[in-house]
Image (tube, rainbow, N blue to C red):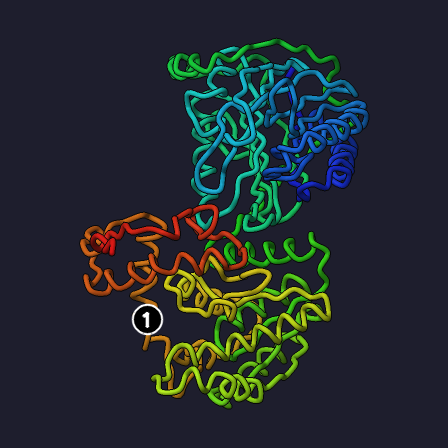
Amino acid sequence: MERVLRVALAQVNPIVGDLDGNARLIKDRIKEARDKGADVVCFPELALTGYPPEDLVLKPSFVRDNLKQLESVVAATAGISAVVGFVDDDGEIFNAAAFIHNKELKAVYHKVFLPNYGVFDEERYFAVGHRCPIFELAGVRIAVSICEDCWYPAGPMAWQVDHGAEVLININGSPFHAGKRVEREKMVAERAVDYGAFVAYVNTVGGQDELVFDGNSVVFGPRGEMLAHASSFAEELLLCDINAGAVPFHRPLEKIRHEAEGAARLELEVTEVALEGAPSSKRGAIEHRMAEPLEGAAEIYTAVVLGIHDYVHKQNFKKVLIGMSGGVDSALTAAVAADALGPENVIGVRMPSRHTSAESLDDAGAVAEALGIQLLDFPIEPAHHGLEEVLTDTFKGTKPGIAEENIQPRIRMTILHALSNKLGYIVLSTGNKSELATGYGTLYGDIAGGFAVLKDLTKTTVYELCRYRNSLSHVIPDRVITKPPSAELKPDQRDSDSLPPYEKLDPILQGYIEQDLSPEELVSAGHDPATVARVIELVDRSEYKRRQAPPGVKITPRAFGRDRRMPIVNRYSPNGARSST
């Protein structure tokens, strides 16, 4: 008789701190999984609290309330098993997975490897786990682990398999960055092959502050074959029938023992948990879903759309405001917002100055019309002239420069935030990563806002996404994409007056910011030495501006903010020592 276990991976979008709402979401998916004949349904890491809960975990009341909600989830598991991520309090606080079976909490797994790099800071909150329960359900031996525990070959999974586990359930809150899915799936497949086991990997989906989670839950078989794949960036219940065979399958014992010897240092305590029940006899055959994952520009664009959708909706905002300059950044921001929230919830605002070209006004209007968003007009010349008069005596005898130019974006942001205060809408800033990296933006002007949609997108990526969005429907005029970019703060201004061309600038930024390459390494990669030195100086001296920028969707492996924490007061420069006088 074959041993077939039907596993359901609940790729859900919880809200951090909404304990009651998350518990309802989990119970709804438990019912759906039970109705579809699942033996066990698995939820992402910390699904009950939302991920990451950050310093909420330091509040004892938050931990207590999440445990109360876990009790209501346990009561909803009649006739099914469930693996649910939550925060456990067992003398210390743990990132935990509850294994629940037929209305009983059978055992709890505590996360062993606590990531403390990039956006992660789990050592701040959680203790290291040592529990290693192994469950037997319908003749199949099952083990559970959490996210980072899967990334180490000689980790908990090796120990579990050495003790007979055949199905390895790994629950995750794995944040997105471009290209990560391929790396992640390769790793999961390797674990399946290394251990000769089935690996069911469930990931959360949705936006949380700067982070966006891509889903892409997956099941691999013991030969590294993909058995099922969930959608990218969408909630889904992925079902997979895991056939463990009439007898345990062949396993690479030498490999397992080698990795288990390394895992022994973790001092994991194995317990055996027998679960009553047999696979559902009422279910029919299912077709395993093999969703085609998103890649390239489509993947990045969808991530940004989901990030802004959840940031706005999870905070109960209704509409957004965007300053429409007629340039490529505001055009893409408006397109993303319209796709995420609906065009009826996006308000574009044109704020021309004496330097704004008729072409830019026309382009902003064309974008608004193509997207179907509302467009308001507030000429800033009266305010601009008035502030110049106020400052006349102080500025008298000085050469006009950046101070005079920056009056304009600060007036524009004052108008946008006045509308935000009056109407209760959130302001979306339009600056991109290239500008934020080099300080090419006005503090309390175009850098300000409630959310920075393009914060982690270089200018060249912005152009790429504009072309991708136009491939779906043509909403960004060709002239917006092809004309030389300009802030239009003085006559005949071009970005290239202040910055290297973006096709030269962006690769240097990627190397310096995302890969931590030195000037010598950048020059060895073929970049001009003078340009490298200039770009590094711009990046290093602009940290104070970035600290005051709003959050934005993380797209690259090294986004500004939690990924890259540089001191503002800092005399080190890879270009050479800074003066101490």
Please give left or right for residue 119 compared with residue 495 in the image.
right
Seen from the viewer's position, the closer of residues 474 and 249 is 474
Does residue 298 lie above or below 14 as drawn? Answer: below
In the rendered image, which quarter contains the N terminus?
top right
Figure label count:
1
Secondary structure at numbered mark 1:
loop
Residue ID for mark 1: 499
Seen from the viewer's position, the closer of residues 340 and 193 is 340
The residue drawn where x is 51% and y is 88% is 389
Quadrant of res 489: bottom left
Seen from the viewer's position, the closer of residues 232 and 207 is 207
Quadrant of res 379: bottom right
Give the percent coordinates (x, y) of residue 320.
66, 67
The residue drawn where x is 50% and y is 36% is 121
Give the percent coordinates (x, y) of residue 559.
44, 51
Residue 471: in sight, yes or no?
A: no
The residue drawn where x is 73% and y is 56% is 316
Give the percent coordinates (x, y) of residue 393.
44, 86
Residue 157: in sight, yes or no?
A: yes
Amino acid at the residue labelled 1: Leu
The residue drawn where x is 62% and y is 38% is 53
Give the percent coordinates (x, y) of residue 31.
79, 33
Does residue 173 lie above or below 481 as drawn? Answer: above
Quadrant of res 496: bottom left
Few, some or many C-alpha atoms within 10 Å of disc 1 (few <14, some 14-19, many ≥20)?
some
Residue most extreme to the front: 393
In the rendered image, which quarter contains the C terminus?
bottom left
